[in-house]
Amino acid sequence: MSRLTLAEIFAPFPQCPLPPHEEVAPAQIPEPYRQLLVHDSHMTVSMEEFHGMSVDVHVLEKVLNEQEYARRIALVKHGTHEVVQGGIVRMQLQLLQPEVRADIMSEQIPLGRVLINHDVLRTIEVLAYYRLQTTPALQEWLRFSSQAPCFGRLAWIHLDLLPVIKLFEIIPPYADFEPPSFAKPTG
């Protein structure tokens, strides 16, 4: 298995280019972003617990071919348009059970909830955490106007011990909490 990079995750979606970013240690991530990102659980569950309600998935873009299904999404508080998380997912469809694949392809249920509902043996391997500089494309994707940086994580989801899902999850700045300013961009 090759090293997964942010550039690889963003590649299928050139209209939402990878913003300037820097890798950060978990201790460098301010709260509440740290509690939402630094764990090995599904972000769907973290978001639902933090916001006290279920979340809905909105698929903004997708790419489908014989080998892979990729999508760029926004998770929103149920019944609203308030984005609580963005994500890019790239998965190998042939490695998914038909019923799991069908639920994912329905684009109606967040990925984490699909895997939980089907009780798929899964492990989330977080590879890195990032601070991302605000760009117009990122503001449009996550529906925010602040210039504050965003924080995210890059991970593999292993299903039945196989690395099947490449994943980037990002949290927009919260209006009532301004994290420290962006340091030095890379990438």
Image: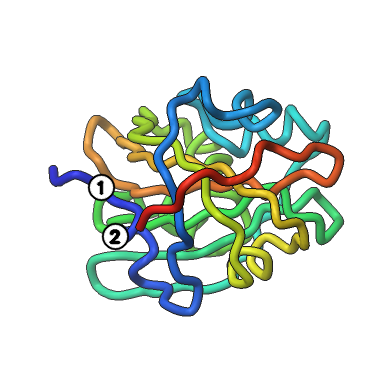
**Pointer 2 local density, CA inside 10 Å: few below 14, some 14–19, many at least 20:** few
- Other residues around mark 1 within 10 Å, as few (<14) / some (14–19) / many (≥20): some
Could you say which disc has been placed on residue 4 in the image? Answer: 1
**Image x and y of residue 90, in percent:** 36, 58
Q: Position of residue 165 (x, y in %)?
A: 34, 47
**Does the image show residue 122?**
no
Q: Residue at x 40, y 39 (%)?
A: 23
Q: Position of residue 113 (x, y in %)?
A: 58, 40
Question: Residue 8: which numbered mark, if any?
Answer: 2
Q: Are marks 1 and 2 in contact (CB under 8 Å)?
A: yes
* Kind of element beneath mark 2: helix
What type is the residue that disc 1 sits on?
Leu
* Spatial CA span between label 1 and label 2: 7 Å
Residue found 48% across the figure and 79% down from its top: 15
Q: Quadrant of residue 135?
A: bottom right
Reply above or below: 72 against 153: below
Camera sees residue 9 = yes
Residue pushed farthest front? 184
Q: Position of residue 43 (x, y in %)?
A: 57, 36
Q: Which SS class for mark 1? A: loop
In the foreground, 65 or 77: 77
- Number of labelled discs? 2
In the picture, measured across the screen, residue 145 lies left or right of residue 61, that is right
Image: 145 above or below 17: above
Observer-nearest of 136 and 156: 136
Q: Residue at x 48, y 24 (%)?
A: 26
